[in-house]
Amino acid sequence: MKKEIIGITRKEQYSPNHVTNDALILYRTGDALVKYGYNVKYYSEAEIEENGINAEYMFSMVQGIKGSEMLMKPEKEGSLIINSPVSVLNCHRTKMTPMLINAAIPFPKSIVIDCTARDVDYFSRIGAKKLWLKRGDVHAEHKEDVSQVSCVEELQNILIDFMRRGINKAIVQEHLPGDVIKFYSVRGSGFFHWYYLNGANKTIFSLPDLVGLANLSAEALGLYVFGGDAVISPEGEISIIDINDWPSFAPVRDEAATVIGKIIHKMVSNDEKLIK
């Protein structure tokens, strides 16, 4: 009898400009698992929020708080879920920021703030002329959720908008000059793909160091399927600026789906070398 494994799609509100790509990587992963002999069924994040689920094996792109909390119950009872709902919530910036800093990951100066904060000069506190203001929970629903700001008034206006939308916490982060790199990876597989998001200088850097920092970040958060962003300084130093759970892998979707399917299959088959 075939083992059943459940795939859970991400809510569209958590996939701004990537709804199709996010769905495709999940379904391609399911196709890879079918080739290993699994019976794959799909549910939506909205269905999980409403009804919960009880299954032994799941691969999930759930990103919201409610859906993640609904998945915690079966995980505590022994279900295998990739990515773990705990690791997904760890990617919410209010948790991720201190966790990466405590793990000694090179990371921009950052402060977790309450969106009701007013008349606070974070530029002086952080010591930067430019800052990034980022919502504190899910990565983005709108383009304004991650905004570069250059004055107190601009920062406060975005905080007011956050409050109107029910966002209570945010991150104020130092702007680091340099080349911005986006990467995709699957921890424990050797798979790593990167490209310049903004590579005006194309400064030479150590790729093994980038891979190492990415994997250390994923390990600190508990992720297996992940992506992120890094900045390469003019001196070639690497700083991680963001880690996200299960990105779209759009540039390398087919290869990534094969790798993700393989690692899930090995975990389901209890390959202890991968369960760390």
Image (cartoon, rainbow, N blue to C red):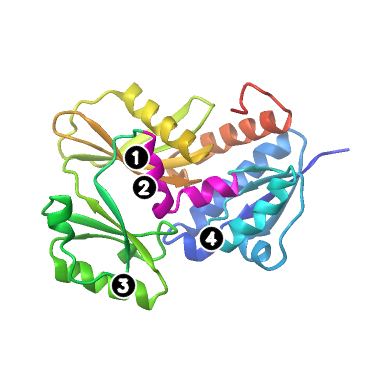
Compute the Cα span from label 2 to label 4.
18 Å
Label for residue 64? 4
Q: Alpha-carbon neighbours of circle 4 within 10 Å: few (<14), some, or many (≥20)?
A: many
Q: Which residue is mark 2?
A: 97
Residue 267 image position (x, y, % from top left): 67, 31
Quarter occupied by residue 100 = top left
Label for residue 101? 1
Sequence-wise, the earlier of marks 1 and 4 is 4
In this view, the mark in front (3 or 4): 3
Quarter occupied by residue 209 = top left
Residue 256 image position (x, y, % from top left): 52, 36
Give 69 or 117, whichever is nearer the viewer.
Answer: 117
The amino acid pointed to by label 2 is Thr
* Residues under numbered marks 3 and 2 in contact, where contact means CB atoms less than 8 Å apart: no
Answer with left or right where residue 192 lies relative to residue 25: left
The amino acid pointed to by label 1 is Ile
Q: Secondary structure at mark 4?
A: loop
Looking at the rendered structure, the number of numbered marks drawn on it comes to 4
